[in-house]
Image (cartoon, rainbow, N blue to C red):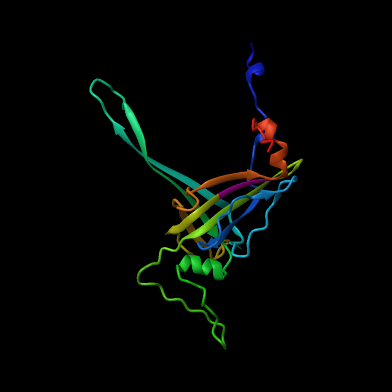
Amino acid sequence: MPYSALRDKKQELIRKARDGSVFIAPKSAALLTTLTTGATADLVTLPTEWEDLGWMSTAGATFGRTTESSQVQSFGSTEPTREDITRDTITMQVVAQQTSLLTIGLYTGVDTANLKGAVTTGEVSIEKPTLPNPRYYHVLGLFVDQSSDGEIYLARYMPNARITEFGEQQYGEGDDPISYPMTFTGFDDSDAGYSHRWIFGGPGWLALLADMGITQATS
């Protein structure tokens, strides 16, 4: 049998993130249970607590996955005879380009609920906290691809995430704006029962289920 009869290559299954946003909600917001709705698989409307970070750098959002393992070495074996995963952490790195109450609050780590501009000048002043407060958020990275059957949504949802690393800010000339580089790490959520969730959907996704080898439920 020739290779051409064995292969199963479908260019229509190659995905790219052509556009997208990172949405943030306070930890008090309800869990996100579904991304699409109805027979046409349209996007649900996010509750008002969710805010868009806005424009990001051209890298979009970068998701990393770090794993560590513990190995058992045994007499007479040159390879481990057992290996157990002891750590499996997912992070999301993003460089937000818009300066807003949301990005200022995330990057400085302060509670902006009562933050207001000065009565006359509108000036805003924030003091670095002596002890950083580990604030937790719902984080949804929603990315969009296009197909002949409509939009395809590729999403990553962390119901219990906090910022664990801040990138450098540059104030100077050049093509890059003043930005807010942040890395979110997802932690297990006791209510959701997970730390990270992959979500795929949209009208274009629905039309490709059979080509992807995915069986659609009947009820």
Q: Is residue 75 left or right of residue 214?
A: left
Q: How many marks?
A: 0
Which residue does the image show at 24% across and 20% down from the upper left? 76
Which residue does the image show at 73% across and 48% down from the upper left? 38
* Residue 169, position as x, y percentages in the image: 47, 64
Residue 76 is one of the magenta-drawn residues = no
* Residue 142, position as x, y percentages in the image: 61, 51
Toward which corner of the image does residue 129 lie, by quadrant?
bottom left
Whether residue 171 is visible to the viewer of this picture, yes or no, is: no
Whether residue 134 is visible to the viewer of this picture, yes or no, is: yes
Which residue does the image show at 48% across and 53% down from the upper left? 191
Most foreground residue, 88 or 3: 88
* Residue 28, position as x, y percentages in the image: 51, 63
Q: Main secondary structure of the magenta part?
A: strand
212 over 87 or under it: above or below: above
Magenta stretch, residue numbers: 152-156
Instruction: Tell which residue pokes out farthest to the top in this image.
Output: 1
* Image quadrant occupied by the N terminus: top right
* Residue 10, position as x, y percentages in the image: 67, 30
Residue 154 is one of the magenta-drawn residues = yes
Toward which corner of the image does residue 3 lie, by quadrant?
top right
136 over 90 or under it: above or below: below
Which residue does the image show at 48% across and 59% down from the upper left? 182
Toward which corner of the image does residue 48 lie, by quadrant?
bottom right
Q: Is residue 134 left or right of residue 11?
A: left
